[in-house]
Amino acid sequence: SKLLIATANKNKVKEISNILSSSFKAFCTFSDFDLDSPVEDANTFEGNALIKARYGSTQTGLPTLADDSGLCVDYLQGEPGVYSSRYAKEGDDIANYKKLLKNLERVQYDDRMAFFFTSMVMVFPQGQEITVSGKLEGYISESPKGKNGFGYDPVFYLPEYQKTLAELDFQTKNRISHRKKALENLLPELRGE
Ligand code: ITT
């Protein structure tokens, strides 16, 4: 069966379709239907994921999965949080993580704890809605490292690997990420367990 991934973010599509490749045969996204993304005006990850998933399912009649995610930094009271994609006014990935590094200037390692969070909502055309979430803990590094991934991956340091997420290869990120953990929670629900 075919799954609509309700996003305009190509990196999310790559990661989600890779993680779900054994459960769904085909994937499509907003651009395949010439749909623009809906306005995300909720102030929680779950609220924004619901907006995107309901919109996608209503517009296409397909089972639809949305991911609303972001980086939460303890020292910054959870910022950038739901504003992760538009933290800096330029709104691109590099400007976003540069602003974050600036806001953490001279903050020592122990106080640089952070986590990625994703809320995922699956909506079926018949109306059933399933919400799951996933979290990945780490530290904000002092400078960017690595070329893989997207967003804040170059500044997200994993002590277990002594690497940033952007230094891990695609398959390794997809084995440990917040996205993987959320989808692990989703699959048993889809099987009705
Ligand atoms: P859609 O709303 O179209 O899905 P978006 O990129 O705007 O795409 P969000 O509103 O959920 O999505 O914002 C997520 C932001 O959080 C994303 O742009 C990154 O800056 C950050 N982010 C989320 N997951 C990440 C990951 O795995 N690695 C690095 N940064 C991530």
Image (cartoon, grey):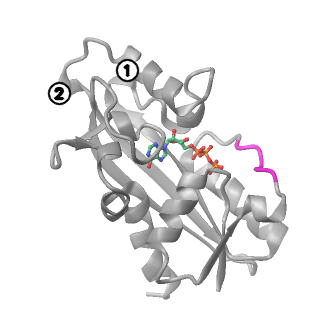
Which of the two discs, 2 and 1, sits closer to the camera? 1
**Which residue does the numbered mark 2 point to in the structure image?**
110
Q: Residues within 10 Å of mark 2 (few under 14, many from 20)?
A: few
Is residue 140 visible in the rendered structure shown here? yes
**Would residue 51 be found to the left or right of residue 16 on screen?**
right
Q: Mark 2 or mark 1, which has the lower sequence index?
A: 1
Q: Say above or below: 105 vs 58.
A: above
**Which residue does the numbered mark 1 point to in the structure image?**
101
**Would residue 146 be found to the left or right of residue 52 on screen?**
left
- Name the residue at 37% across, 62% down: 174
> Which is nearer the eye, 139 or 15?
15
Query: Start and end of the magenta stretch?
Result: 36-40
Residue 150 % position (x, y): 47, 44
Query: Mark 2: which amino acid?
Result: Asp
Distance Cα–Cα, label 2 vs label 1: 15 Å
Residue 98 % position (x, y): 44, 21
- Name the residue at 55% across, 38% down: 82
Q: Quadrant of the N terminus?
A: bottom right
Outermost residue, top side: 106
